[in-house]
Image (cartoon, helix red, strand yellow):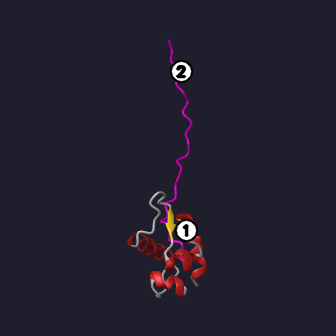
Amino acid sequence: MATAKKASAAAPAATEAPAKKRTPNAAFMKPLTPSAALAAVVGKDPLPRTEIISKLWVYIKANNLQDAANKRMINADAKLKEVFGKPQVSMFEMAGLIGKHVK
């Protein structure tokens, strides 16, 4: 009994370009000057937006400002109330609210 051989289609070898390294987003790395209210928390020196958020989290954790029941909520003290404009914000709102306080 003869066995039939399958014809293998000669697929052209796919030449893939080498993977490009990701470049950081320049908008996030641009130093921004904080307003007076925000400078009271993060300092007056120009910082990238990512560093401003990091320093805000350091301040929040150091002063125990996260809500005990819902850790996603931040209870603003007097300094943060000037920045956020309300007594409690979610961690997701925080980045948007500081946009008004940086140049």
Quick one: label 1, few (<14), some, or many (20+) residues within 10 Å?
some
Residue at the spot of label 2: 4
Residue 88's label in the rendered image is 1
Asked if residue 32 shows in the view, the reply is no
Q: Which badge, 2 or 1, comes first in the chain's sequence?
A: 2
85 to the left or right of 46: right
Say if 18 sits above or below 43 in the image: above
Q: Which residues are magenta?
A: 1-26
The residue at 53%/74% (across/down) is: 28
Q: Viewer-nearest of labels 2 and 1?
A: 1
Disc 2 secondary structure class: loop
Is 80 or 18 nearer to us in this picture? 80
Say if the magenta span includes residue 17. yes
Is 32 or 30 nearer to us in this picture? 32
93 to the left or right of 77: right
The residue at 38%/72% (across/down) is: 62
Q: Give x and y (percent) for residue 50.
A: 49, 73
The residue at 48%/73% (across/down) is: 53
Q: Give x and y (percent) for residue 87.
A: 55, 71
The residue at 49%/86% (across/down) is: 46
Disc 1 secondary structure class: strand
Is 95 or 3 nearer to us in this picture? 95
Say if 67 sits above or below 96 in the image: above
